Structures are given as C-alpha cells and as structure tokens.
Amino acid sequence: MRQSSLLLSLLFLWTAGIKGQSLIPSPLTYQPLTGSHPLERTYRIEPESKAVWRDAKAAGWDLLQHSPLTGRRGHTPVRSKARGIISLAAYVDDPRPEAYALRITPDTLWVQANTGAGWRHALTTLQWLADEGRNAIPCVSIEDAPALAWRGVMLDVSRHFYPVSTLYNVIDWLARYKMNRLHLHLTDAAGWRMEIKRYPLLTKQAAWRDAALWKTWWNGSRAYAHEGDSAAYGGYYTQNELRLLVKYASQRGVTIVPEIEMPAHSEEVTAAYPFLSCTHDPKGQADFCPGNDSTFTFLEHVLDEVMEVFPSADIHVGGDEAGKAAWPTCPRCTQRVKDEALPSVEALQGYLIRRVADYARRAGNRRIVAWDEVLDDSLAQDVQVMVWRDTSAVRKAIARGHDVILAPGAFCYLDAYQDDPSAGPEANGAYRPLSRVYAYRPLSALSPDERQHVRGIQGCLWTEYVPTTADVERMLLPRMMAIAENGWTGGETKNFAHFRQRAEAETNRLRAQGVNAFNLSAEIGDRAAARQTVEHKARGAKVIYHRPYSNTYAAGGDSALTDGRRGGWDYGTGTAWQGFISRGRLDVTLDLGAVTDVNRVALDFLQTAGPEIYLPAHFSIAAQDDDGRETMLFTHSEAEVRHTLPSVETLEWRGHVRTRFLHVRATNGPLGGWIFTDEIVVE
C-alpha cells in the first residue's frame, strides 16, 4: 500500500510537471517551484563577468533592463516601481554549446549559458512563459539542451515564388521553436530565385515562366518567359535582399543554407544558357553537361556569388534524381569518362559533385551537402549526406565516413496531406499528419558511434501544390513544431497526447494573430476504416502470390491481405497498403483452408495520382476448385482515372458460392503505375 502511494505521488508530480509547461520544444527538465514571478516590473541585470554580459547582451537580454517583461501583442504594460533581478552566469555544469539553465523565483531570474545560442534559447523560453502569463509567470527550474545540432526547415521557393516577407516570417517561427537552419531551395526547373550578377539571364529569363501554378505549367508548356512579359510568373531575390535576410536570421540564431541544384533539375538554366547542356537545346535540358568545362566555370562563378552572400559553412548542391539521358551519347561526356578513368558514364555525377565540393572547400572553406543519391558514387568524406529516400541510407553514409542530416520523406516531407484529403486543397499525394511527423525517432537503432555522425534533422516543404504564403503557413504549421521537438529531444521518448495539446494551443495562438496555420482543433483524421480491424471469413487465411508485391510497400508481407488491417490515407512503408508494380499486376489465390460458403468478396483499392497509384483498369474474382478450374464470379473495367484527390474505391462481388480457393486479379491500364490494396474481405 505504501509503495502504491509513493508511485501515485511520483505520478502526480510528473503529470504536474508535464501539464505545467506548454513549451515547444519540450525542455529536458521542467521542475515547478513554489510561487510566481510578477511581470509588471523592470530589472537590474547582474552579469557574472564582462564576457557573460557581452554574449547575453548580443542575444537580447539587455532589452529587459528598462522594459517590463512581456511578449504579449497588444499589451500595454503598467510600469511598476518594483524592480526584479536578472542574474547571468556561465553554465559550468553543462559544457554543451546550446545548453542553458533558467530558474525563476518570485524576485529573481537566474540564467546560465555558455554561448550566444544558449542565451537566446533561455530568452526564448522566458518570453514564451511570459506570453502565456497574464500578470505573472510560474516559478520553475529548467535545464535544457538540444540532442541534435542541425534543426531546420527547407522551403522550396522555385516551384512557387514567395515575397521575402514570407521568409522573414519563417525565420521568426524557427527562432520561436529553437530551430537554427533555413534551407532555401533556390533553383529548380520551375524557376531560378537568386540574383547572379555574372549571369543576368538567370533572373531575366530563368526566373520566369508562362503559368503561375506549377501544376498547370508542368503538365502544359513548360515554357519560360522573360522579366516584364505580361503573362510572366516568377521572381527572384536580389543579393541585397538576401544579405539583409541573412543578417536578420543570424540575429535570431538561424543560419540560411542555400541550395543550388546540380547536375539535374536544371532546365531553367540550360534554357537560358543552352551551351551548358549536352544537346544545346534552347527548350532546356534537365542535366548539366559534366563533360563541358564551361559547366564547371559556370558553377564556380555562381558559387562565388552564393558564398559571398551566404556565410553559411554549408552549401547544398542537390545531386538528386539525375536522369543523365544525354550523357551516354554526348562526345564531351564520353571523353571525360576516358580522361578521368571513370568506370562508366553514370560515374560522371560523382565526378561533378567531387569537383564542386573541392572548389567550395578551396575557394570558401565550405562543406557541401547533397541529397542521398550521391551515395551511389565515391565522394570526399567531408561531403554531408541529406537522407530523404530511405533511412537505410543513414548507416550506409555513416559507414563511408559521411555526416548525415535526416530528412526522410516518410516523416519529414511536409508537402503531403495533413488531414483527410477531401477536407483541404490538393497536396502531393501522401498523408502525413502531425502524429506521423512526431512519430519519427531520428536516433533509433543507431549506436553511440553512429550517432556522432548525425548532424541533425530537417523538415522539407516542396511547393508544387503550395502556391501562396497562406499555403506555406498552413503546410508548415504545426508540423514544423514536431520536427523541432524531435530535433531538440532526440525523439526517444514520446508522448503524442501531450505534444498535440501543446501544438494545438500554439496553433490557436498563431491563428488568432492572423497566421493561416492548419486548424488542429478541426482535424478530421485518418480514414475511418483504418482505425479498427475487420473480422471476416478469410482472416488469417493463406495467400499465394503469383506476382510479387513490392518489398518497399510490403505492409505485413505474405499475411498483409488477410490480417484484418485496413489502409488509411498514408500509403507509405509500414502501413496496411500493399503495393504491386511487377508488370502492373496483382495476382493472388486465397486459400480458405476448407470449402466455405461465400456471399461477398471485397477489396479496397487506393488511388492517388501524384505518386502514380491508380485504380486497377481490370479486376476479376474467380472461384477455383482443387484442380485449378475457375468459375468467374466478377469482372470490372475502369476506363480512366476518375479522381484527382486521393480516394479509396471498393470493388466487390455479392452472390453465393461454395469454394475453398478464390483467385483475385487486378491489372493496370495505359497509365501504368502502382496498384495498392489492403485486405481481401470474405463474408
């Protein structure tokens, strides 16, 4: 009985600590103390040393000296004769660069930190608490430090262009959630977004296209326009605008990491400067020509101006999804392969990345970051790998000596739907709600030595379906808060209910300020059928696969189609949806184990056109005897794709038959692509 009382007391204290704070990200320790600290007062600041005061002042602590502590908008503070004390000291108990300690008593704010980042984080925490307080903030003791050094967001400004004010807002959110990287995807086929003075056509032509919406342009002409044309859509940031942005970000502890895509995703460049492609086609080719010395001259000149504007130690160079279509027949490329003794034309990508990385190292003492496709080639060890496709690439990169930044699409790509697809504008196919982003455990299954090579985590917002600033706000918020939490805590310990409560409160605060954050309070959630298992006559029955399922989308493997699990809006790895790509065909026999009365056979099929998952063009169900003779029960043909938004369609037969075996077939049509199903329901 005594032990139970003790456990209940400990549980109460732990719960009180959890409920007593709404910070995002959650601090390492949060211990409520007795009393509260009045807000309406000015302060006497007592720094331990000149060095401490220098760093704390640079982080903004001096602003509290003659002003009441309040971050509440629209609040007019009432000055009081009462003065509080702010005691600033070095944090000798924790040498980690971004660590801080904050102890709030009724009269004094005790603060410890070692670096500008630590002082900023302490001030951010204090201001957050002040935002929530009416006349006082709770007395509390906090000790805090991030698990990962790189905690960022990537914003694609190529597919759709946003005013620079949008970038300032993103920086403010990053700072509030103690994130420290803004990765700007400045170049891609849809538009070049940075002024490069040596190559004026990049902003006079490559920054403009003939349709505002990316989808219209990509599925239509893919033509570029000229600055000043009446129908031209696009824009770019001047170097002066970017310098001011860099300064603003730096003052808030945020580093802006620029990305210049190479060798692929470069149609806009090769349309403006056709000699940089293998074919010299003025319509624009996806890949630079790595056999052409002019390509490297161009890239080095561009990097010179990029490095002059952005002081970031890291420069992102893309390196993803290179088609390399023209390289095998390009005389310059084949000659380069011979001259450099490369094993194949494919190896030219690695050659280009190595050469660019070497230039960035020599010319600006910068380190290169690239998407994980570059692991297919040999690279210098100081090239950092940003993992987006498969988390297995993390260990592969580390084993080869590379540092990694984690951005796996299944958790960190924020361009997907965050709610029922019918409830909002079109997105990029998948379903990635706040719970899915939060569920990521970035350091899971890594050894202590491997963890040393993980620099951090990043959320990525690709913007094919994000045309406006309001859409940027809706897609980033609140999901970037989950990225922040995972980067700060390491994601080892999870309490989604508590996190969601904090995220909903923060989202409501943002919406009250006019920010178009997604309304968590009105979230519909996943497909209803996915929330519970289904019982039926084939539950647990054997499935014989005549065509293999994809190992990438295996769901539960050989038992996936009879395990009672239904698919939701998320088709990704680990869900109930099983994917078939082999010759575009689902072909299975269901063994019920004994002759059974069957009155209904039904399968759900997913369609989401973005990743080329389509309803089957032809579908059939047949009863089969022990000798393999079949009696056709049902056939169905689909003329074309009927839905733009993700949807699920049930194909079923109703009637009566006695059989042990059911043969189910589904094939795709002229569009090809995937077939996804989740369960063969037999009643």
Image (spheres, rainbow, N blue to C red):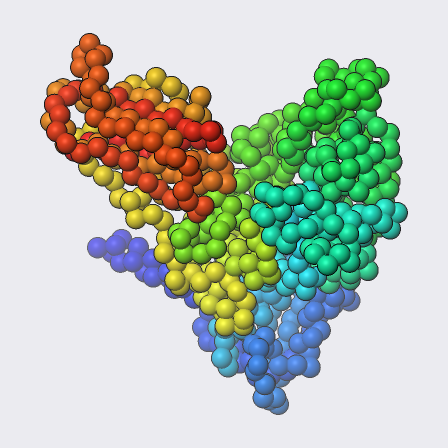
Q: How many marks?
A: 0
Vertical arrangement, residue 585 with respect to residue 252, above or below = above
| x and y, in percent, of residue 198 in the image | 88, 47
Give left or right: position of 110 versus 534: right
As rendered, which of 616 and 504 lies closer to the eye?
616
As rendered, which of 194 and 248 lies closer to the eye?
194
- List the single residue furthest toward the top: 627
| x and y, in percent, of residue 683 in the image | 16, 33
Q: Quadrant of residue 560?
A: top left
Residue 427 visible in image:
yes
Q: Quadrant of residue 66?
A: bottom right
Give left or right: position of 468 versus 672: right
As rendered, which of 232 and 612 lies closer to the eye?
232
Vertical arrangement, residue 510 with respect to residue 536, above or below = below
| x and y, in percent, of residue 527 in the image | 34, 47
Residue beneath the point at 86% across and 33% down:
294
Q: Quadrant of residue 252?
A: bottom right
Q: Quadrant of the N terminus?
A: bottom left
Residue beneath the point at 62% across and 26% down:
399
As rendered, which of 573 and 98 lies closer to the eye?
573
Residue beneath the point at 68% across and 61% down:
163
Give left or right: position of 624 versus 510: left
Vertical arrangement, residue 393 with respect to residue 127, above or below = above
Residue beneath the point at 43% across and 29% down:
669
| x and y, in percent, of residue 623 in the image | 20, 21
Give left or right: position of 617 versus 381: left
Residue 113 visible in image:
no
